[in-house]
Amino acid sequence: MPLLQHVMDTDLERLALDHIFPSLLDQGFFYVDNFLGEFVGHFVLDQVKEMHNSGILQDGQLAGSGLNSGISKRNIRGDKIAWVSGIERGCEAINFLLTLIDKLVSHCICRLGKSVIRERSKAMVACYPGNGTGYVKHVDNPNADGRCVTCIYYLNKNWNSKEHGGILRIFPEGKSYVVDVEPLFDRLLFFWSDRRNPHEVQPSYATRYAITVWYFDSEERAEAKRRFRNLTASNQDQERNAP
């Protein structure tokens, strides 16, 4: 087992240093296929399907109160989601996936420009139920909330984008082209979370599963938390002083 672990860690380091961080710096995105392999990938898929079938996934929310008032949320994003840390019962394979992604990102730390990554979000397990819903063009981190790198793992067997839709389309900042990423089983995608990569999920006409995590720039995240605390304190003061 130690030898196997060493081989795996060596492969992850090579993938990170030779492909992920150079592609992020050069193009702003990178994806790799057959990341876990058929056998392990199926374990992750089975756990996600079990979460879906048991009703754990709930409608995805929109950031900000009153955002797009008067517009149906489902016209903006139509996914169902759940947040997991990986230590929950029934999430063992998901936890294994997260551990490998963490190792990949750890090899890129100190090489991704000025960003210093020390933490990430929980994993967002998401399902588009295949009723033609998607997620309109947006930026994950438009307002400096700390999210630096978006990482998405796809779980969709026998996906045919011409029939099923569900493509993630990236609109790289300042470029005349778009990047279409099919949500294929065992595909792992990385891209910058900020305004360099507006993107959309095109309407899905088959059940579409994915797991997303966001890695935080430490300084930006700390500043975002300070702003939130100050705003909360200011609002509380206004409530106390209201006539």
Image (tube, rainbow, N blue to C red):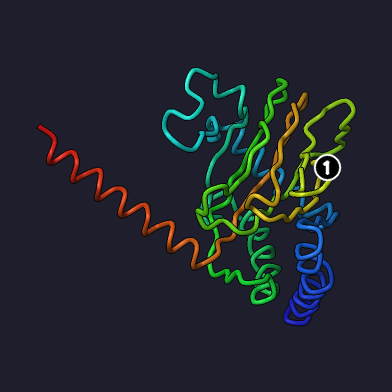
Which residue is the site of mark 1? 178
Residue 159 or residue 242, whichever sits in front: 242
Q: Secondary structure at mark 1?
A: loop
Residue drawn at 69 percent across, 75 percent down: 111
Residue drawn at 84 percent across, 41 percent down: 180
Residue 127 or residue 38, whichever sits in front: 127
**Where residue 51 sits: x, y (%)?**
59, 38
136 with respect to 18 (left or right): left
Q: Is residue 124 above or below residue 101?
A: above
95 with respect to 210 (left or right): left
Question: Residue 217, located in which quarter of the rendered image?
Answer: bottom right
Question: Residue 112, located in which quarter of the rendered image?
Answer: bottom right
39 with respect to 135 (left or right): right
**What is the total number of numbered labels drawn onto the structure image?**
1
**Where residue 234 sits: x, y (%)?**
25, 48
**Where residue 174 sits: x, y (%)?**
77, 49
User: Quadrant where the C terminus lies?
Assistant: top left
Residue extending farthest to the left is 243
Label 1: few (<14), some (14–19) or many (≥20) C-alpha neighbours in 10 Å:
few
Residue drawn at 81 percent across, 58 percent down: 27
User: Quadrant where the N terminus lies?
Assistant: bottom right
Q: Is residue 200 above or below residue 39?
A: above
Question: Residue 116, located in which quarter of the rendered image?
Answer: bottom right
Q: Amino acid at mark 1?
A: Val
**Where residue 206 sits: x, y (%)?**
77, 26
238 with respect to 227 (left or right): left
Residue drawn at 69 percent across, 43 percent down: 198
